[in-house]
Amino acid sequence: MKRILAAILAAGLALSLTACGGNGNSSSSGEGESLKEITFCLDWTPNTNHTGLYAAQALGYYEEAGLKVEFVQPPEDGAPALVASGKAQFGINAQDTIAPALIGDAALPVTAVAAIVQHNTSGILTLSGKGVDRPKGLEGRTYATWQNPVEQAMMRYCVEKDGGDFSKVNLVPSTPTDVLTSLQTNVDSIWVFYGWDGIAAEVKGIDMDYWAFSDIEPTFDYYTPVILTNNAFLQEDPETAKAFLAATRKGYEYAIANPREAADFLLAASPELDKDLVYASQEYLSAQYQADAEAWGVIDPARWDGFYQWLWDNQLLEEEIPAGTGYSNDYLPQ
């Protein structure tokens, strides 16, 4: 979902930036006079990763917490930049893609404060029968790459760990907007999040092969997606941050317990979505939001730090990211 953001959302950039004017101040008129305004920047068009947010809004959890929350689409340079600028208090991104933003002179003042999905549900999807049901099977096949160094390093690692030769994988620069259609062209394999594109294949009855990164290498069980917030906002108004996360947790807990009803909230907000896909995807993801964690949103320090250590060990970072950097569980309900 995340890697083709720029291609389809650039046209909405001007509107997004206009909409992202929330600054945490109280609403100025009407029934929301006492509500604090929160702007939340999505990482993508609305989908089942976001259901808990829409459930929290529809069920009045945000209003009960004294908040008026607006969801906006990300600008071309993504949610982290908007959150860092202060034009949105919260946003969504992933641990792998924010790594460069945590180090160096151009580091962004953002912190991950909740895991939306507890485990990495991404992997490689291909049409069944092409022999790509394992990483070595990519030899002689085409892979749609978005030419990201971390992405390609992970792919190389998985292929070589499985005894394959990564130089024999045909890398085709591509950011397909329709995964299932692309897999029926000259593209053999695509990195997907199973909860959306894998489920879409199931719904359409398309026979697919799939392998998950975390099954090949436990270190790749990093956090994607996560909720980010602005560091200055955390320092200046920690109680509002905690109120937002408490209400959001309630929304995701509702989605865990009531997948179909929660999916209806998402569909009400985005009626253009495929109902069958949303219902099936929601059934899958509702079991993934918290999974085996003690509570929704909690980030495991060992897994977070372990992935960044892997990036450093494999020379994918200009600086080492110190342990404990870039995330906090302190704003979640205790």
Image (spheres, helix red, strand yellow):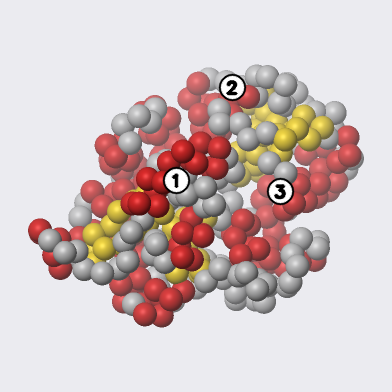
First of labels 3, 2 by sequence position: 3
Left/right placement of residue 177 relative to residue 11 reads: right
Measured as percent of width and height from the top left, residue 8 is found at 51, 36
Nearer to the camera, 118 or 242: 242
Residue that label 2 marks = 181
Say above or below: 158 vs 249: above
Question: Which amino acid type is shown beneath numbered disc 2?
Answer: Thr
Question: Which amino acid type is shown beneath numbered disc 1?
Answer: Leu
Residue 162 in sight from this viewpoint: no
Measured as percent of width and height from the top left, residue 269 is found at 29, 39
Determine which quarter of the picture holds residue 260: top left
First of labels 1, 3 by sequence position: 1
Say above or below: 294 vs 170: below
Mark 2 residue element: helix
Q: How far apart are marks 1 and 2 (CA)?
A: 27 Å
Nearer to the camera, 93 or 306: 93
Q: Residue at coordinates 40% horizontally, 34% vertically from top-left?
A: 278
Please give the label number shown on residue 282.
none
Q: Residue at coordinates 44% horizontally, 45% vertically from top-left?
A: 13
Question: Which amino acid type is shown beneath numbered disc 3?
Answer: Asn
Mark 1 residue element: helix
Residue that label 1 marks = 13
Please give the label number shown on residue 148.
3
Left/right placement of residue 225 relative to residue 63 reads: right
Q: Distance between the residues labelled 1 and 3?
A: 23 Å
Q: Nearer the viewer, mark 3 or mark 2?
A: 3
Nearer to the camera, 33 or 65: 33
Left/right placement of residue 198 relative to residue 278 reads: right
Marks 1 and 3 in Cβ contact (< 8 Å): no
